[in-house]
Image: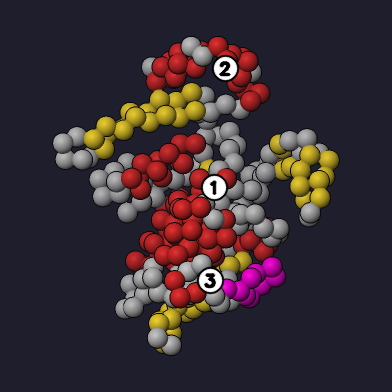
Amino acid sequence: MAADLLEELLRSRPGLAPVLARSEWHEVQIRYTQIDRDAQGVPHFRTHAYRVDPAAYFYPASTLKIAGAALALEKLSQLDLPGLDQHTPLRIGSAFSGQVAVLHDFSAPGGKPSIAHYLRKLFVVSDNDAYNRLYEFVGQQRLNEALWEKGYRDLRLTHRLSTPFTAEENRHTNPFTFYRDGQVIYQQPPACNAHTWRAPAPILRGKEHWEQGKWVAGPEDFAGRNYMSLEVMQELLKACSSPRRYRPGGALP
């Protein structure tokens, strides 16, 4: 019924006819959720889908940032150290090829970077570097395994955004030092994901692609690139919209 509703709406728009006629070629996927809240403010969801297929590759672009943000906050909570929270100033070191250290952030209050300021930049301007720093704080392996443990299986987050890092460089993440008033509160050593995660077969898209600063003829292979199904994207949004009340399918705590 849900698929019929969306299809009926789509077909009522003549301008979409050429796309719908070749929906498989265009790889069209649509998932729409209506949100109704009861008198207590508890959300109730009614979801409609058109051609949604978790097995079909979908590049998540910036939508994955919400996962990095949520898991960075979760990690701080799990560390549970006196004086350590999202506002604690931090320094980021460099311990592997390609890594860039951070000692100052002049867009932050007092010029001191913090998880809170990275979250602010991530949600206000969708800053890619802010996501990358949260990715480095959580670590590639934990970023994926924590989401899988919560029930979000159809995803693979394997790289920073808008960087030329290799797959090996993306498996390695930077050391962090959190401090306050000259005193170190927490030190996190550099980490490396023990696994290399790729799709089992090539995922070729496009006629040419950007590689090492130039256009290269031929499709790009997305087998090792970030992947998140449309369903997982929306379930994450639903979980974070009311985390204390919505928990189906392994929502975020």
Vertical arrangement, residue 42 with respect to residue 198, above or below:
above
- Measure the alpha-carbon separation of dots 1 and 2: 26 Å
* Region of the chain picked out in magenta, as a range: 94-102
Q: Are marks 3 and 2 in contact (CB under 8 Å)?
A: no
Vertical arrangement, residue 2 with respect to residue 135, above or below:
above
Q: Nearer the viewer, residue 4 or 215?
A: 215
Left or right of 212, for residue 246: left
Vertical arrangement, residue 174 with respect to residue 207, above or below:
below
Q: Callout 3, which amino acid?
A: Phe
Q: Residue 116 at x, y = what percent?
A: 41, 65
Look at 58% across and 38% down and name the residue there: 58
Q: Is residue 43 magenta?
A: no
Examine the residues drawn in magenta and state their main secondary structure: loop
Residue under numbered circle 3: 106
Compare marks 1 and 2 and give the one earlier in the sequence.
2
Q: Residue 134 at x, y = what percent?
A: 50, 62
Left or right of 173, for residue 114: left
- Measure the alpha-carbon separation of dots 3 and 1: 24 Å
Q: Considering the image in quadrants, where does the C terminus appear?
A: bottom left
Residue most extreme to the bottom: 182
Q: Residue 76: which quarter of the image?
A: bottom left
Q: Residues within 10 Å of mark 2 (few under 14, many from 20)?
A: few
Residue under numbered circle 1: 62
Marking on residue 176: none
Q: Residue 208 at x, y = what percent?
A: 79, 39
